Structure formats: structure tokens, C-alpha cells
Image (cartoon, grey):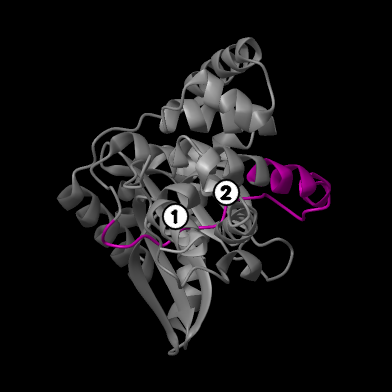
Amino acid sequence: MTALNEHAERFTLLRPLLFTIAYEILGSATESDDVLQDSYLRWSRVDLARVRDTKSYLAQLVTRQALNALRARAGRREDYVGPWLPEPLLLTDRDASADIVLAESVSMGMLVLLETLTPDERAVFVLREVFGFDYGEIGAAVGKSVVAVRQMAYRARRHVQARRRRFGPADAARTAEVTERFLTAAATGDLEGLLSMLAPDVTWTTDSGGKVIAMRPLEMTGAERVAAVLLALFGAFRSRPDVRIEPVDCNSEPAMAIYTGDHLEAVFLLEIVDGVVSHGYGIRNPDKLAAFGTPRTITRTDTAPR
């Protein structure tokens, strides 16, 4: 096997893991693809005889490139119009849905929470709490001492634990039932039925990036307020015969992809707790929907050679 082929084989075996790391640090599938492409170009020039642990080496490489991308977009975020949400991630049938840690880590609520950490804290939290890397490996990835990484991990863990929502094993049948009832109530204009599907303090956030017309307000709380806006929105959908709504597996949560013809207009994600919707997210920014049609495989495991 030539050196180039061996580089490609090792990287390909680890690609789902590396993509998952990049996505959890960036919250963007598009940027994660760019990070992996750049990381592979760097990896292809590495002397494999000096690589003691392929997984650790590539995880550190991808983390450094993801952090560079995260810092580079900081200025763009300051000029962003309206609420910012991560890119929705369409999952393949092969995703580790039974892995509760993985499912929580890519949920929209967790990704939004991770946005409140510094870039270094986010990378440390992801590598330690989700993927189980040791402090020395994480320190090499973020350019910090082991002592500094331990302190950062402690701060990030406390920050997340203080703000995280309850996330447990999902009853797939129950979740599917709630999602179907939610969609039916919204699509038929059933106010009472929709209210029964919403937690009293439900929140709804819409990310349009100022690029498309979105339902107003972009952030709202309370079942009656959310229900009224959703009914108006779905009422507009009913008046357009070319609109279709498809249920999808997105970020390990029930979601709906809304199309006009073949054009993806929006993705709605639902967080369901105790049989009701506790949080809803609507992604309308076309830039964040551009890569949605490509299903992704996420994982915390690897099959690469050491």
C-alpha cells in the first residue's frame, strides 16, 4: 500500500468520528466539511512512521482547525441578524441513536448551550465529556497545559450542568406519536389540540439570518403565544398546494422538513419532554439549509488502526 493510500484509508475510517467532533465544536455541517477537507490536506503530508495513535493525532488536528474556524467567524456573528441557531443535521439510519451521550451532545438545545462557552471551553468540553479524550490529548489539541485544561473542563462542565435541560432515553413510539399529533393539530388549525402538545412555558426560536421572511417574533415563550403563531404559519402553508412537510430524523430529535416543490424552505425541530414540546426551533436561513440534503453518520467510536 502506498503512503497516500494509507493516509486516505486511515482518514476515511475515522471520518464519521472526526465529522462529529468538528460539528459539535462548530455547530455547522458546512464548516465541518471544510475543516475535514483542510485537515486531510495537512494529514496527507504527515510522516505516518511518527504517528503513534491515529485517532488521537487526527482528533487533535481536526480540533485545531475547527477552533481556527470558530474564532474566524466571531466577527461575522456580531453582525448576524436575529437569533443564531446551529445548522440542522440530517442523520442516516446508521447513527448511534441508542447512545444517549451522543444523542444529547448533538441535540439542538445542547448545541445552543455550547454557544455560551468560549471556543477553548467548548472544545475541551466536547473532547472530554463526549469523546473521553485524556487531558494530555486535549491540551495538545487546544495548545494549553494539562492543568489549564483540567480547570477549563471543570468550568465548562459546571456551566453546562447548571443550564442543561433534562435529556434521557427517548421512547421512540411515544415521540413519534407526539410529533404526529403536533403536526396534525398545526396543519388542521386545531388550537386546543396544539395547546395540549405544548408545555405551558414552551419556547420557540426562529433563525432566518435576515435573509428570508420569517414568522414574528423570532423568539417567543408561552403555549398560547407559540400556538397562535404556529397556526398562522401552517395556515399559510395550507393555502399553497405545492408545500409538503416531511418528518425527518434531525439532531437525534423529531423534526419536520418543509418544502415548496423541491426547494427546502425550513426545518423545524422539536424537543419533547414528558410527552409535550418544551422547545421548538425553526431554521429558515437558506445558508444553513444548503447542506441539509446530505444525511450524516455520527459516532463516538472508531475502527482506525493505532
Which residue is more in the foreground, 5 or 227?
5
Magenta stretch?
66-94
Q: CA distance from mark 2 to mark 1?
A: 17 Å
Q: Which element type, helix, strand or loop, lies under badge 2?
A: loop
Residue 89 falls within the magenta-colored stretch: yes
Residue matched to label 2: 27
The answer to whether mark 2 and mark 1 are in CB contact below 8 A is no
Indicate whether 140 appears above or below 54.
above
Indicate whether 113 appears above or below 287.
above
Q: Residue at x 78, y 48 (%)?
A: 72
* Residue 216 visible here: no
Q: Residues within 10 Å of mark 2 (few under 14, many from 20)?
A: many
Q: Earlier in the sequence, mark 2 or mark 1?
A: 1
Q: Is residue 19 left or right of residue 140?
A: left
Residue 50 falls within the magenta-colored stretch: no
* Residue 139 visible here: yes
Q: Please, what is the three-letter code of the amino acid marked with disc 2?
A: Gly
Residue matched to label 1: 15
Q: Please, what is the three-letter code of the amino acid marked with disc 1?
A: Arg
